[in-house]
Structure formats: C-alpha cells, structure tokens
Amino acid sequence: MRILTVLTYYRPHTSGLTIYAERLAKALATRGHQLTVLTSQFEPNLPLEEQSEGLRIRRVPVALRVSKGVIMPSFGRIASEEIRKHDVLLLHLPQFDAAGLALRGRLWKKPTVFIYHSDLTLPPGLFNWLVGAVVGLMNSLAGLFTHKISSYTQDFASHSPLLRRFAHKVRIIPPAVELPAALPAEVAALAAAHNPQGKRPVIAMATRLAAEKGVELLLDALPAVFAKYPGAMVWFAGQHTDVLGEEAYWQSLRPRIEALQRAGRWTFLGTLTLPEMAAFYPNIDLLVVPSTNSTETFGFVQVEAMMNGKPVVASNLPGVRQPVRLTGMGRVSPVGDAAALAENMLAVLDGPQPSAAQGTQLRAEFSPAACAERHEALFGEIYQQLHGKELS
C-alpha cells in the first residue's frame, strides 16, 4: 500500500516523536509498502525532496515560526496533492495541521490514523495560552475526523483529556524501540573517552535539555546521592544547547551544571548515534527520567536501558511509569519531588541490579516490525469498513 505519514518535524531533527516516526516508516517500508514522509523544511538548507533509506521525504517551505510551530502557506495544497496519491494517511500529533488532513482523509475515504504522542503543555503566558488553545482545537477536530487513534499505552489514553473524549477510536499499540547489539570495543571506547577514571555509579539522562524533562530535579537530588556515593557522576546524552525554545531554561541551569562539570561530576556526551547509544547503556548504572508534565508520555530510553539490564527511576506520569511497572526494573517517583527522586535513586543503586536477560521480552514487544504489523492491520481494518474489500 501507499502510505503518507505527516509530521511537523522529521529528520535531522531529533526528538522521541521523530525517532518513533522514522522507525515506524522504515519498518513499514521493509514490509513492502511505499512510504512518503510529508514534513516541514524547518531548516532552509534541507532539500525539498529526497530519497532516504527507502523513504521518499517531501518538505514544505516554512514562512514563519510561532513558538515551536511553523507556518507553511503552501502546505494545504501540497498535502491535498499527496493524500490523493496515497492509500493511507498516518499522522503524528500534536500537529497544527492535523484537522485539515484528517478531514481530507475522511472525505476522500482514505484510512486515516493518528498516533497521539503527547498532550501539549506550554509555559505560562497569554501567547502560549492562545497557541495551546488553537492547537488543542485542531487536535480535537482531528480526533473527530480521523478513523482511528493509536496510543502507546492504556495508562496514558485513560488520562489524556483528548483521548478520553475519543476512547472508542483508540487502539493501543506499543511504540517502536530498537537498539543494535553493543560492540565491546565501542563500550570500552566510550568509557575511555568520558569516564577514564572508572567513576561509579554513573547516573544518566538521555534526552534533549528541555523544561519538561525535569533536569532541575536531578540537580536538586544529586547532593544526597553524592553524600552516599562520592564517586558518582552524571552522563547527559542528547542536545543541551540551541534546543528550539529552550535557551532560557538552559541558561537557568547552566551555572549549576558548569560547577558540576568543573568538579568532574557531569559530562555532556552530545547527541549520540544509534550504535553509540548501544555503547552508552552498558556504561551506566541508572537511567533517570524525572519528567514533569504530560508532554512526556513514555520515554523510549527507558526500554532501551532495560534492554541492557539497566534500572530506571521514572516520574509517576501516565505512560511514563509503565515501563517500570511492566518490568519491575526500577522505581516510580512522585512528579516534581526532588527529595523523593533522590530517595528512589539511592534505593535502586543500593538494591539488587536487574539482569540483561530481562530485556529479551522487551525487544520482541517493542520491535519496529511488531509496531508496523499492528498499524498495518489497523489500516486494513479501516479500509475493509470503508470499501468492503481488503487493502492490497
């Protein structure tokens, strides 16, 4: 089948949403489908159209940015052109343009599914309130027009204001998570580069530095951890500077982090490739996911860490708490409570460590192939209902 997948930001932008969208698109292409990714030309040097790893990528020029969103005057015309050429429409929300896309899918009887990655939570302020209200309205209309909605977990679906309203359309499909096997030489090389003295324990975050990620909570929790483990250090894997919309947040944390860097207790590793991430997890002792709001709904890095037998302390947020609940490999910590975060980190570090064998089942459950197969079945189910025949 010909599948059009649409999202505001695609590669080379890095976020959990773009990583998932890329993995699912590639897995669907591997299953023999023709995939087109329709997205924004969020950087002017990006090509308007290209072929990449079996996918056709078409980018729409951006005229204006509004907060983290983009205004693309030609998007409607190009989207209509592409939807007509495809059999299935797969959207990734939140997305300002989703309502118009889902309406086209319904009117033209194209099986339309959107994957709802998170609720939109913006900082306080009148402008952000207006942006949130507009995007919320567009998401609600998309929920009305779409045929089905894909959600990572029932836990999040049951708590999301949007998904509760359209519960009859929701299908639970675990996200695509994959990680190559770590090569011993690469594991050793990463350790030599960033922890030559072999300090322990290594506490890690793997994310971009953004306000909803709760980095300040980890900073507040660290003194209690350092008191018990004087040799502890933090590895932060992911973009930490020039993060879209997060410069003020970075500047607010910068003095504290730079003090830890000077003391040899905090290391920024930058954005790592997939093989580098495979070498990253064997080098850590604990992954921390101290997210603060429903912009975070799962945390793929939790599953990646667990695949490597590494425990996690995660916030008690709908969806985010599910990997720990599913596996028992770590602890769930109250949202926004730095003292409780420190207590839970110490409890995990002091306790028995999980084994890598516990990650075997996770690799099968969250494989991109399984995710693609489940979405493929959902597309076929909708097509059967719309047209009374199977979708080839």
Image (tube, helix red, strand yellow):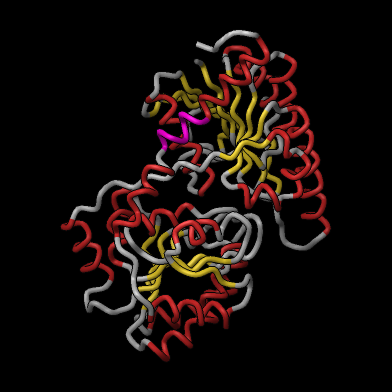
* Residue range (magenta): 368-374
Specify the principal SS of the magenta part: helix
Toward which corner of the image does residue 185 lie, by quadrant? bottom left
Task: Give residue 120's position: percent from left, percent from top.
Answer: 70, 51
From this viewpoint, is residue 255 visible?
no
Q: Nearer the viewer, residue 311 or 21?
A: 311
Using residue 314 as the reference point, say whether residue 231 is left or right of it. Answer: left
Task: Give residue 39's position: percent from left, percent from top.
Answer: 57, 32
Using residue 318 as the reference point, say whether residue 173 is left or right of it. Answer: left
Using residue 89 as the reference point, say whether residue 306 is left or right of it. Answer: left
At 59% from the left edge and 54% from the top edge, which residue is drawn? Answer: 319
Residue extending furthest toward the left: 185
At 31% from the left edge and 60% from the top edge, which residue is drawn? Answer: 280
Q: With respect to residue 343, does 30 lie above or below?
A: above
Q: Is residue 311 magenta?
A: no
Toward which corner of the image does residue 177 lie, by quadrant? top left
Q: Nearer the viewer, residue 86 or 210?
A: 86
Q: With respect to residue 77, does 339 lie above or below?
A: below
At 52% from the left edge and 62% from the top edge, which residue is drawn? Answer: 209
Q: Nearer the viewer, residue 266 or 365?
A: 365
At 48% from the left edge and 87% from the top edge, which residue is drawn? Answer: 223
